[in-house]
Image: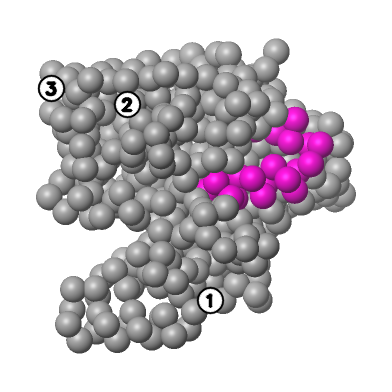
Amino acid sequence: MLIRRRTAFLGLTASWMLGRSSLALGTRGSGPDDPRFVAVILRGALDGMAAVVPYGDPALAGWRQGLLSPEPGREGGLLDLGGFYGLHPALPGLHRLYAAGEMLPIHAVAGHYRSRSHFEAQDYLESGADERLTSGWLNRAVQAMPSAGRDAGRPDGVGLAMGLTVPLLLRGPTRVGSYAPAGGRHPDEALYARIAALNAADPLTGPAIRNGLKARGFSDATLAGVPPLPGMEGDQKNRKPGSFEILAHAAGGLLADPKGPRVAALEIGGWDTHAGQKGRLNGPLSQLDSGITALRDALGPVWKRSVVLVMTEFGRTVRMNGTGGTDHGTATIAFLLGGSVAGGRVGGTWPGLRQGQLFENRDLAPTTDLRAIACGVLRDHLGLGRTALAQVFPGFRSSPEAGLMRG
């Protein structure tokens, strides 16, 4: 129990240092043409049906009318993904990647577990096994990568985690150090917005916190949890990048170095939207969008040999709850991005939203195993064979997802 509490404390400290975002880097590459791979964990459970909205399903409005954005083509509407799905309007950068054939959303994705506990689900998501392990699947993948570079005189690779802890995803036999940047010791705006929102109804602390933050320069949009999107407020040259954007740019620069790492893991929190989801999701989605854009820009020409997998521990309920939010669910969305991705389409098998089609009468039913997506990337992008994949994902017996990569 003491160990678990200490681990939790370190995790909270890292969140305070980096604004609920962190970065870990894997083994060094052996050449400038090596493929690059980035895993992004969205902690808190992203509502996949809010990020990639199946507006073409006739049953959707009956479950969550109060959460829906206008359809594509209308003011403030969704960004069209081919006529059935629409991308959340806070994701214009991802939409540009989709138009360029470099973004592949895959819907109705779930892990191999059926837990609605954040802690259990994140452990299983990162270990990649049917039981809790002390190593993560990405660390095991790094260990198995063909021709993986090694520092002279060392049998294993060397990595760096920006924060006080290394995520389970990248823990294991390949060593990963940690580093807390001196410039990141203040919470990001989302945390202040959360504090203001939690106290908004209190007649004493609510106005005091709000007025105090406004005196420090926080806008009404920020205090409402809705950071302005690019081009919508003021001079964007003065826009302050968030912690995830900063870390994503740093990761891209290191991955772009021919002698730098080939693998990185990033994480961003703020996705547990039990109340006020429609407004609160704008902030995390905007951070994700700007972070992926920063990562692509920093990678430069290496972007064409890169794949980014964005994943979350589980989805959220199909029904909107009584506080304008959604509760812990099952299936959700996963994103593949990068110049090596066969994008410009929405993958996965849509299960439907009629009453009899829901999982346990409440959730989007899973039709794609997240491990199949990860195995498809590890096989077709990083060159892992069948034996290596069995070590990376012990217990997984299905076939890797095909057709995810170009060529």
At label 3, which amino acid type do we have? Gln
Q: Mark 1 falls on what kind of element? A: loop
Q: Which region is colored magenta? A: 287-307
Q: Is residue 393 visible?
A: no
Q: Position of residue 275 (x, y in %)?
A: 23, 55
Q: Mark 2 falls on what kind of element? A: loop
Q: Is residue 299 magenta?
A: yes
Q: Position of residue 276 (x, y in %)?
A: 25, 55
Report which quarter residue 210 is drawn in.
Answer: bottom left
Please give the name of the residue rendered at 17% of the width and 33% of the height, measured from the top-left corner. Answer: 63
Q: Is residue 263 magenta?
A: no
In front of the other: 149 or 47:
47
* Mark 2 → mark 3, Cα distance in angstroms: 17 Å
Residue 30 lies left or right of residue 299; in this view the side is right
Q: Mark 3 falls on what kind of element? A: helix
Residue 305 lies left or right of residue 294; in this view the side is right
| Up-down relation of residue 66 to residue 357 (above or below) | below
Q: Which labelled disc corresponds to residue 186?
A: 1
Please give the name of the residue rendered at 15% of the width and 46% of the height, measured from the top-left corner. Answer: 321
In front of the other: 315 or 48:
48
Disc 2 crowd rating (10 Å Cα; few below 14, some 14-19, many 20+) is many
Which residue is the site of mark 3?
Answer: 355
